[in-house]
Image: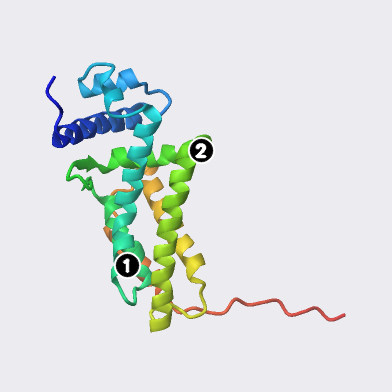
Amino acid sequence: MPRITPERREARRAQIMAAARRCFARDGFHQTSMPDIAAEAGISAGAPYRYFAGKDEIILAITADAFRLVFAPMELLAAATDAPLVADLITASLDVVGTETVTDAAGHTVPVDELLRCVVQTWSELLRNDAVHTRAAEGFEGTRRTLADALRRGRGAGTVPATVDPDNVARVLIALLHGLLLQRAAFGLVDTTALHNDIRTLLQAPQHPIATAAPSAS
C-alpha cells in the first residue's frame, strides 16, 4: 500500500474534524459516536482511528481550535502593542463572535456557529474530563498572562488606570468575551458592530470612587 503523504494525512484529519464538529454542534459530544463521525465524513467506520486515538482526542483538537480562533485576535494585539487600551483588547476578538466563518491555522474555513456550539459544551465537559480540563486550564492561563502583561505595559504608559490590578482586569476581559460568545451560541447574537462603540464608551467613562458608609455614632 502506498504511503500517505503528510499533506494527504492532514487533509483527512481536517475532513474528520469537520465532520465531528458538525455532529457535535448538532447532537452534542455524548450523543455522537465514532461511527457517527465516520458516516458524516463519508469514510469507513474504522478510518478515524488511523488519525485519532478516539473521540476524546477529537474533542480536544476541536475545542483547542475553537478557543484559539476566538482569543487569537485579542492575544495578538496584546503581544504586539506597547500601550494597549482595554477597549481595544476586547473589541479585537469581538468581530469573531459576529462573523459567519473563520480560517484555522491550516487554512480551512470553519463555521463560527459550529465552533461556538462546541465551546459551550466544553465548559461542562471540562468538569468531568481531566484531559479537557487540563488543556482548558493551560489555554486560559496562557491567555490571562498575555493580557495581564499587556495591561501592565498600558498601566505604565498611562493608557490603563494605575489603580487597577492587571491580573484581575485580564480575567474580566476573558469573562466578557466568554459571555458574548455564549450569547452568540445560545441567543443568536450575530450583529456585534453596535457593541464596539458602547464598549468603548463604557470602558472610557469617568471613574468615580465608591462611596462608603460613614461609621455609625456609638
Residue marked by disc 1: 79
- Disc 2 from disc 1: Cα separation: 30 Å
Image position of 177 with respect to 153: above or below: above
Q: How many marks?
A: 2
- Kind of residue at badge 1: Ala
**Helix, strand or loop at disc 2?**
helix
Q: Nearer the viewer, residue 69 or 86?
A: 69
Residue 130 tag number: 2
Which residue is painted at 49% across and 66% down in the image? 167
Q: Residues within 10 Å of mark 2 (few under 14, many from 20)?
A: few
Q: Position of residue 78 (x, y in %)?
A: 33, 67
- Kind of residue at badge 2: Asp
- Compare marks 2 and 1 and give the one earlier in the sequence: 1
Q: Is residue 106 visible?
A: yes
Q: Nearer the viewer, residue 197 or 135?
A: 135
Is 16 situated left or right of 27 in this image? left
Name the quadrant of the N terminus: top left
Q: Position of residue 48 (x, y in %)?
A: 28, 24
Q: Position of residue 7 (x, y in %)?
A: 14, 37
Which residue is painted at 32% across and 76% down in the image? 82
**Helix, strand or loop at disc 1?**
helix
